[in-house]
Image: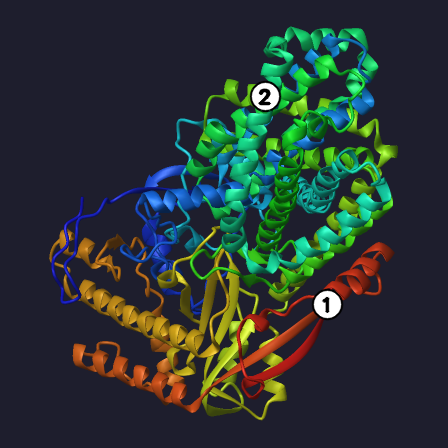
Amino acid sequence: MAEGSERGYGQLAKMDSTESRWVARDEEEDSDEEGESLSQRMGLESEEEDDNVEQRLIRTAPRIDSFDVEALEVPGAPRNDFEDDSLGRHIVLALQTLGVVFGDVGTSPLYTFDVLFNKYPLAQKEDVLGALSLVLYTLILIPLVKYILVVLWANDNGEGGTFALYSLICRNAKASLLPNQLPSDARISSFRLKVPSPELERSLKIKEYLENSLLLKKLLLILVLFGTSMVIADGVVTPAMSVMSAFSGLKLGISSVEQDEVVMISIASLIVLFSVQRFGTSKVGLAVGPALFIWFCSLGFVGIYNLFKYGTDVLRAFSPVYIYYFFQRNPTQAWMSLGGCLLCATGSEAMFADLCYFSVRSVQLTFLFLVLPCLILGYLGQAAFLMENFTENQQVFFSSIPSEAFWPVFLIATIAALIASRAMTTATFSCIKQSIALGCFPRLKIIHTSRKFMGQIYIPVINWFLLVFCVAFVATFGNIYEIGNAYGIAELGVMIMTTILVTIIMLLIWQINIVFVLCFLTFFLGLELLFFSSVLGSVVDGSWVMLVFAAVLFMIMYIWNYGSKLKYETEVKQKLSMDLMMELGSNLGTIRAPGIGLVYNELVKGIPAIFGHFLTTLPAIHSMIIFVCIKYVPVPVVPQTERFLFRRVCPKSFHVFRCIARYGYKDVRKEHHLIFEQLLIESLEKFIRREAQERSLESDEDRDTDSENEVSCSNILVAPNGSVYSLGVPLMAGYSGIDRTISEASTSFDEPRDETVTDARQSLERELSFIHKAKESGVVYLLGHGDIRARKESWFIKKLVINYFYAFLRRNCRRGIASLSVPHTNLMQVGMTYMV
């Protein structure tokens, strides 16, 4: 432990002298040499270190650079995971959970037996028992055991879905293909990084393989993009299946209704359904939650009625031996019917993808104590009805309803089906927003529908995109049997990807016993591949549409990610050198006009090449330049107090800074430009004050050389919250040599190195006053639009992808500045084309 004493900047608390961190093998050999090399470094922005050196976990003193200082956690800051524990809040949350999460899986009894027995015609009672046993164990194994008991715990700080799993993996290993990660990202309080322990060598080796293998990174990205494309495809087929199956009951209630009329009514209902999607999840979820509660109760009561009326022999289906008999009698037809059996588990992925709206406990408890019992009773009742009515194996649910209750149950079933159609739609919105934030989908307009819950969103383009394809899907196929085949392949595609990603999380993050991991992977992946083979056997009956649709979506996402990666790598290669900036001098080779210029770019290090275009194009440049990088980090939320990171790009007289504005993939980027500017300037002032504080600590170290303890205390950094951090290498160690060099050429800051505390305070006040005057003169946003073109000698495929497909996506996507309401009078734009 190290003790601190009061030095005028607050009380220094106790702290651990060591911490676990990843370092290169040679990094810990000589810290003195490292400090000396830093003091000799002329550039204030350190270059990217080589990521290919061998790394291992050791116990060493924590190291902090200037970005790390800004990233220190501020305890007491408002968190987004605050929950109200009142009884009324739990009731409201339970109703919203029913309305948003369980609509899809809750309406599966409307069509499961219909599609299943379309592939396996009934011949005897044992066929019913075998099919029921297959449905019951599918319902128990996939939604309950896999998703409720295992997968829900793989959430990313409350976020679910394919990209949440990918984000969780990228946060624990450098698996992202976009090279913009910074060590300071791990200092975000919501990062919650669990460092692998030295005892678990397996986790360390997996992390090393994943970080060093480009092939594994690409394979992981392909799996995630494929799973995401299946989620979006699922968002198309789910409304079609749910609505069509519900309105098919009209043919039983009204004999004159034909299938074409059912199709027209379904299309009209879908149009209305997608039109009200913009009102938001909390409003619609609370409104339809009671309706889903009545539906589940009706499903259970109808099942109990049929059990009493037709007998309880179907309870024998809880014995798995009937599954064996089911396959023994007719193996081929039983295998073909697996696609229909899987429909009882549809909506399982929605429970995970929609987790961002609710808590894990609320989803688990609602499923265990309401949804699952009612579903089991519903299937038992339908099977009991079929045991006595072999010929009525189509529209089984509506046929099993008592005649007196047909129309009330039909009405509530229709409402439930419409609600279920929203389950995968909201999951699609959430998944696409995550993919946009992680650079795997073109930017789109996102509307946040709730002021209280930031995760509840609406994406207009995707909403109407889903509507058009959903209507086309219903009009093309016109029956639930072919739609059911497509439904199964979309669900299974997502399930398989989830199984693989959760297995990686088990190995890399959870660090659980390898036997359990292998059992999970072998059992569930084998089960899902068995179902998948059955669905592929019916690919000509409608499944091919989902495969083509998912393939197109996959290509869009992969091309966007590929183009964005090439663009970023090219900008890094062509960034301006620090030597050039030093040659230009503090005036940057032009006239410095009063004001602040915010130069937007994507680089987290270095000076972008587009800045050279501003210097050569504009007659003058602002007296203060801030390079602003909007960066999404692999966490759901970045607290406002940790939003901005600052660093000096050039010597003090240049007044040039870098700012990284960090956002999580769940954060809302809708600040007014004046609010954004105010927050940015306040964070810059805090950075300058902390910089001056560190200078003072260094000067104390130079004076206090009497004892080793006092020297160690001088390497102490006080965070804004009073926390104490050891600085193995002084934060501003490189400034002494730089100031001595610059003092010969600079005319603005000719101050001696051994300045007094009073002079230091005066220098601080002058710089803060300079910032205030520049702010009063106005803030201008300097936007550089960088496009990329393939070189002439490039392959034809690369030219086609970059010059046409990626260029088309960039022209039609939403620009990043659109999220800030900046007046056109405050905007200046320069275009630049990079050859890749």
On the image, the x and y values in percent for residue 148 come to 51, 30
On the image, the x and y values in percent for residue 394 come to 78, 26
- Picture quadrant where residue 17 is located: top left
The circle on residue 256 is none
Q: Where, quadrant-wise, is the N terminus in this rendering?
A: top left
Q: Amino acid at mark 2?
A: Tyr
Give the CA separation, mark 1 to mark 2: 56 Å
- From the viewer's perspective, is residue 92 above or below residue 102? below
Can you identify the residue that label 2 sits on? 305
Whether residues under marks 1 and 2 lie with C-beta atoms below 8 angstroms apart, the answer is no
Which of label 1 and label 2 is nearer to you?
2
- From the viewer's perspective, is residue 570 above or below residue 284? below
Q: Residue at x 38, y 49 (%)?
A: 81
Q: Residue at x 39, y 30 (%)?
A: 198
Can you identify the residue that label 1 sits on? 812
Q: Residue at x 84, y 56 (%)?
A: 795
- From the viewer's perspective, is residue 187 above or below residue 162? below
- From the viewer's perspective, is residue 580 above or below residue 352? below
Q: Amino acid at mark 1?
A: Asn
Is residue 214 visible in the rendered image? The answer is no
- Picture quadrant where residue 458 is located: bottom right
